[in-house]
Amino acid sequence: MSSDKIFKKNTVGSLADNRSVLLGIQIGPLSFWLISFLIIPLLVIIYYSFCQKTAGGGIEHIFSLENYIHFLKTPVYRKVLIKSFILAFNVTLVCLLTAYAPAYYIATSKTKNRIFLLILLIVPFWTSLIIRNYSWILILGREGIINVYLMKWGIISSPLNLLYTSFSVVVGFVHWALPFMVFPIFLTINGINLDLINAAKNLGANNFQAFLRVMLPLSMPGVAAGCLLTFIMTFGSFVTPVLLGGSEDVMITMLITERFLRLYDLPFGSAASILYLTLMLLFIVIYDRIIGLKRTMNM
């Protein structure tokens, strides 16, 4: 073998080794993170979901589907799932109707004003979620600002029951989740060539027709991404329904937390967690079939 061939062989081998090292450096921390904090805990929860709680509060390590069957057969738990879905859907719808106009305004503003408006949008994140929910308690309570001024102006004679209702939960969720709807829509509209709108107007379309036939269809990837993100985050939220909701506003995450922390029923809590995760994965699959995740990612 000639020296040139030996040199080329050693060079190729060295490059391959370097690529392997670089690849290990790149995916090593991510793999460790996923295995340690996602895969292993998930496998533990799956294992416990097939166990049984003993009469003394211990765990009987036997394979059983009793926890899943009990959850699916109990009307109360099915009602909790339906309530969680309805609340998440309502919040997503309100966020969409509320977020599109400011997202469009920010995306079409001057760069200097755009930065300022985006900063205003993320200001609520500088405050704890618990503090923001407590602020709504002060606003919506029977002696809150709304009831005080409505009674002062003679509009109502007795305080309205605004707090600890589905209405207060939706309000708290919208306050928290609105930026997650605005940002995807803003990013999509920001990438749209506004000359297309002008072209539509030159062809005879008015402002509404140009928006309806050009801007809205082109901004749908951002709308789809915002709806998916808002729905999943709302469905899996815990703090807001606990602080602002009433006895009829129990969500699946509250049920899981109660089973783990108050009743110490790890097997049933694990089964409820796996059912919740399965439901979310099923929702994403259906969402992908109807709208398409590729379209959502191509914002």
Image (cartoon, rainbow, N blue to C red):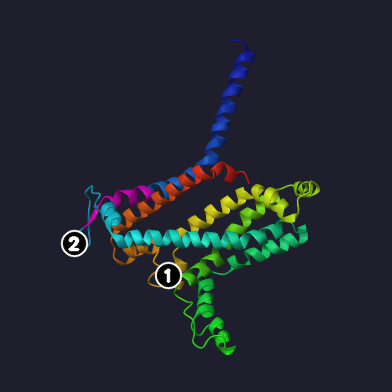
Q: What residue type is labelled 2?
A: Ala
Q: Name the residue under label 1.
A: 242
Range of magenta residues: 41-53
Residue closest to the eye, 235 or 167: 167
Rendered residue at 30%/60% (across/down)? 75
Q: Residue 55 carries which label?
A: 2
Q: In which quarter of the image is residue 23?
A: top right
Residue closest to the eye, 163 or 39: 163
Q: Which mark is residue 137?
A: none
Badge 2, how many Cα within 10 Å: few under 14, some, many 20+? few
Q: What element carries label 1?
A: helix
Q: x and y percent of residue 93 in the render? A: 54, 60
Q: x and y percent of residue 139 in the render? A: 54, 79
Q: Is residue 209 left or right of residue 146?
A: right
- The quadrant of the image that shows the N terminus is top right
In space, the residues marked 1 and 2 are separated at their CA atoms by 29 Å
Q: x and y percent of residue 63 in the render? A: 23, 47
Q: Which amino acid does label 1 sit on?
A: Val
48 drawn magenta: yes
Which of pointers 1 and 2 indicates the residue nearer the eye? 1
N-term-proximal mark, 1 vs 2 = 2
Q: What element carries label 2?
A: loop
Instruction: Reply above or below: 72 against 290.
Output: below
Q: Which residue lies furthest to the left in this view?
A: 55
Q: In this view, does 28 lie to the left or right of 9?
A: left
Badge 1, how many Cα within 10 Å: few under 14, some, many 20+? some
Rendered residue at 46%/79% (across/down)? 161
Q: In which quarter of the image is residue 269?
A: bottom left
Give the dominant element type of the magenta stretch: helix, strand or loop: helix
Rendered residue at 48%/43% (across/down)? 31
Q: Is residue 40 visible?
A: yes
